[in-house]
Image: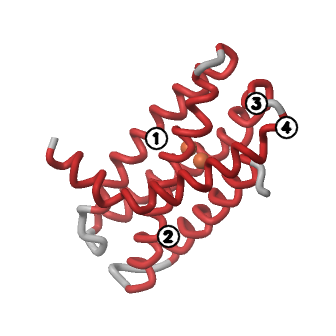
Amino acid sequence: MTSIYDAIKADHNEHRKLLDTIAETTGDSKERKDAWQAFFNDVKSHAAAEEETFYSKLMHETWGQDAARHSVSEHKELDDLMEELHSTDMSSPGWLAKFKTLKHDYEHHMEEEEQDVFKRAKEVIGQEHNNAFGTRFLERKKEEMSLIEKKRQDSLED
Ligand SMILES: [Fe+2]
Ligand SMILES: [Fe+2]
């Protein structure tokens, strides 16, 4: 059994590691490509699962609404930036500059979730539900992982 907070934090720590790996590698090396692909897929499914299990709950309660809206709009900004990076040549000079912006913004986003958002969520989600939310988050994330390509195709066709 994993609480929703531990599940989200474990993902964040993995994302922090991948961000560091990408920053430390060079050009379009295999190591960087692999780390980027892992980051891209995991962050997309993580954010979708957060929205569907965690933020949707917070959104219903006055106390969580502002924080939830703020985070979800950051998800959109981060996703746009990730899509831009995904379609840019990794060895081009612009790529690393853009990646650094993403790294900075996403690290800030995770920090805010773990501090401010978790504090608010704990007012909204009773402690006895922490594990049930954690389980739902992990299941949702797994489903999202398998939907990534389909969702990307759909949004490109819009
Ligand atoms: Fe998030
Ligand atoms: Fe998160």
The relative height of residue 64 versus residue 116 in the rendered view (above or below) is above
Question: Within 10 angstroms of label 4, few (less than 14), some, or many (20 or more) residues?
Answer: few
Q: Is residue 6 left or right of residue 28?
A: right
Direction left: furthest residue: 157
Q: Position of residue 2 (x, y in %)?
A: 77, 55
Q: Is residue 39 left or right of residue 139?
A: left
Which mark is first along the chain, 3 or 1?
1
- Which image quadrant for residue 1? bottom right
Q: Amino acid at mark 4?
A: Glu
Asked which secondary structure carries label 2, the reply is helix
Number of the label disc, if any, that sits on residue 125:
3
**Alpha carbon distance from label 4 to label 1:** 28 Å
Q: Position of residue 106 (x, y in %)?
A: 53, 49
Which mark is first along the chain, 4 or 2?
2
The relative height of residue 107 versus residue 31 in the rendered view (above or below) is above
Which mark is first along the chain, 1 or 2?
2
Q: Nearer the viewer, mark 2 or mark 4?
A: 4
Q: Nearer the viewer, residue 124 or 133?
A: 133
Number of the label disc, if any, that sits on residue 109:
none
Give the residue number, with chain letter if any, for mark 2. Answer: 23
